[in-house]
Amino acid sequence: MSEAAQQLVEPTALAIGLAAAIVAATGDEPRVLVVRTRHGIDALPSGPLEARHPTLEAGLRNWVERQTHQALGYVEQLYTFGDRDRRETDGEGAGGALSVAYLALVREARPAGAADASWQSWYRYFPWEDWRAGRPSAIAAIEPPLWEWAAQGGKLGEERLRLNFGLGGARWNEERVLERYELLYEAGLVPERVRDGKQGAPLPEAARGVAMAVDHRRMLATAIGRLRGKIKYRPVVFELMPPSFTLSELQQIVEALSGVRLHKQNFRRLVEQQGLVEETGETRAETGGRPARLMRYRPEVLVERLAPGVRLPALRRT
Amino acid sequence: MSEAAQQLVEPTALAIGLAAAIVAATGDEPRVLVVRTRHGIDALPSGPLEARHPTLEAGLRNWVERQTHQALGYVEQLYTFGDRDRRETDGEGAGGALSVAYLALVREARPAGAADASWQSWYRYFPWEDWRAGRPSAIAAIEPPLWEWAAQGGKLGEERLRLNFGLGGARWNEERVLERYELLYEAGLVPERVRDGKQGAPLPEAARGVAMAVDHRRMLATAIGRLRGKIKYRPVVFELMPPSFTLSELQQIVEALSGVRLHKQNFRRLVEQQGLVEETGETRAETGGRPARLMRYRPEVLVERLAPGVRLPALRRT
DNA sequence: CATAAAATGCTCAAAATGAGTATATGGGGT
DNA sequence: ACCCCATATACTCATTTTGAGCATTTTATG
């Protein structure tokens, strides 16, 4: 094991980068920990895989904890990026030709250890992904240029657009975060593409979202999509919740993450009948209405995370 | 882009390995392409990421196509292994401290290009995963030592065993291939663990399955689990099917992959009502019974793979 | 003490599922 | 030609699982 570790240390041109989308949920916003690069661009915490790291995940934890003073709870590998756009235009630890991206969930969003680190709503980077208050205005701004671009791709291009963005009768699928971002990238509507030296005419920031260093917005899109999918079949949401919470709070977090509103009564039915939570016995009256029962997740559920997650009984029409 | 490519070439101790679980389905067996190492051990086709490869996936395709003369169709990144067990005990391309594993699906299983390459049923490596003919006998052999081992982990260990192997009333979940393999590894029942220099008393091969080089069996387990999950919500099965097929043939392949038997009438209902396939107009009479209609998948379905997959209407009791 | 604001409880119709039973249509003997 | 066998294909039916509402309870507030 330390033998393997030794190998990793050799100074080499091909550095392995580690990057993490560290997610928390405060109130009703999904937040991600970002750092500001010296060029003033937002980036995910990232750094090189170092000698002393016996494993990739250990490397990540160690690195992040030193940098941000944030202890990571649940950690999951997302994807290894190395395909394209690994240029050294921006960002701190650039120069890695390969970058292993992780998703990490933390319970409390500590005040962001380092000075240049902060917690940001992830919708800052993906304004079109938040449908909680109805169709986001960013979509309206994005739609015309997207159609224009898609028309060049013929029928297939238009179909792709329709299905990914829920246009023309297609249903919005909250999991296709990455596909949507890639579409915008290909269409040249985000600044990242221009930065990568290709054609494009980025939209105003309110519509296209805030750009990130290198391919970090792709990583974050991957993280969001993965998390949105996962909460439906694994009880990962609880990694973001405090020890006790009300069902409404749980619902708020799920809605914040998935970006869609849910039917309250059906949400409760699901969560309760699946035995994901149990009552603590206490109640909390802070909301001005009937006090809510405080719940906790059943610890058995966390064991190996084998139990089903929170399915999403989505509202169809509203 | 070629700038990045240049960097990848630098001779370095930290080679990036690429490995692929290349899957095909012939008749009613799910097959995977394996090569025999000089030590006589089965391994997945793998090799280093080379200079001329602009992207990871291109590197993989290029590499595999040269080595096995097998053109890859659908390709998906699985996971980057680098955590443990990357020792140089066995295998060809060992020495890579990091290995990016891919799943690839091919339509026809060509006669395995190279001499040392062959198509093997994946149940050769995971005999406990095939429940098509009822409870596999491997499970019976595995169960006692597993319980014994689990008991050391207390209640939690036993619960983990119960849920992963569908013991004691729990339902068999065909997707947990990796979790099951890891359990066997931890319990010391597969030779890989002993090879990695840890404690263990491997079972006879009929029960524990054929071992593979380095951590390739983990990779294959990841691939199988991913594929089994994916066929339920994406029409990936069709990447394994010939241009036209009967519904029974489709069902056979799905059963082969998932390792469980399905209810015939309900399977057809699902596939047809979801509009995944359409009739070609022809029929095929070769089975000795009523001739079956030949079907083809609706090409629209493959566009971007956005349509739903084949859900599994599993039999409960038999 | 009425009213607003939540949290809970219950009901109901539509759709999806799990399991069968019944019918159709070839080929292969006799 | 006729019967039988093996499949393929068509329908049925009882249960569950969803999507949507309406109704009731329980506090805080003015």
Image (cartoon, coloured by chain):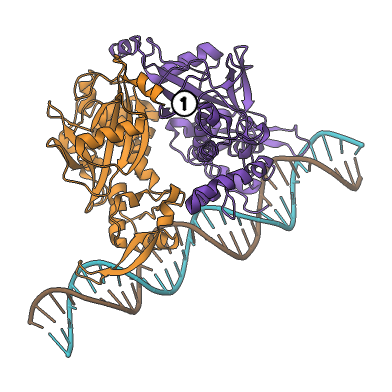
Chain colours: A purple, B orange, C brown, D cyan
* Rendered location of residue B296, percent (x, y): 34, 60
In this image, A80 relative to B286: left or right?
right
Q: How many marks?
A: 1
Q: Position of residue B177 (x, y in %)?
A: 32, 38
Residue B159, located in which quarter of the rendered image? top left
Q: Quadrant of residue B186?
A: top left
The reply to whether residue B117 is visible in this rendering is yes
Residue at the spot x=73%, y=36% of the render?
A: A291
- Name the residue rendered at 27%, 40% in the picture: B22
Q: Residues within 10 Å of mark 1 (few under 14, many from 20)?
A: many
Which residue sits at x=56%, y=35%?
Answer: A200
In this view, the residue in front, A256 or A191, is A191
Q: Secondary structure at mark 1?
A: strand
Give the quarter of the figure containing the C terminus of chain B.
Answer: bottom left
In the displayed structure, B179 sits above or below B317; it is above
Q: Position of residue B157 (x, y in %)?
A: 36, 29
Give the left or right position of residue A143, taking residue A217 as reference: right
Q: What residue did someone put label 1 on?
A: A102
Residue B169 seen: no
Foreground of the two, A226 or A208: A208
Position of A163 with respect to B30 (left or right) is right
Q: Quadrant of residue A76?
A: top left
Give the residue type that dot 1 points to: Tyr
Q: Quadrant of the N terminus of chain B?
A: top left
**B74 left or right of B213 in image:** right
Front residue (pair B177, B214): B214
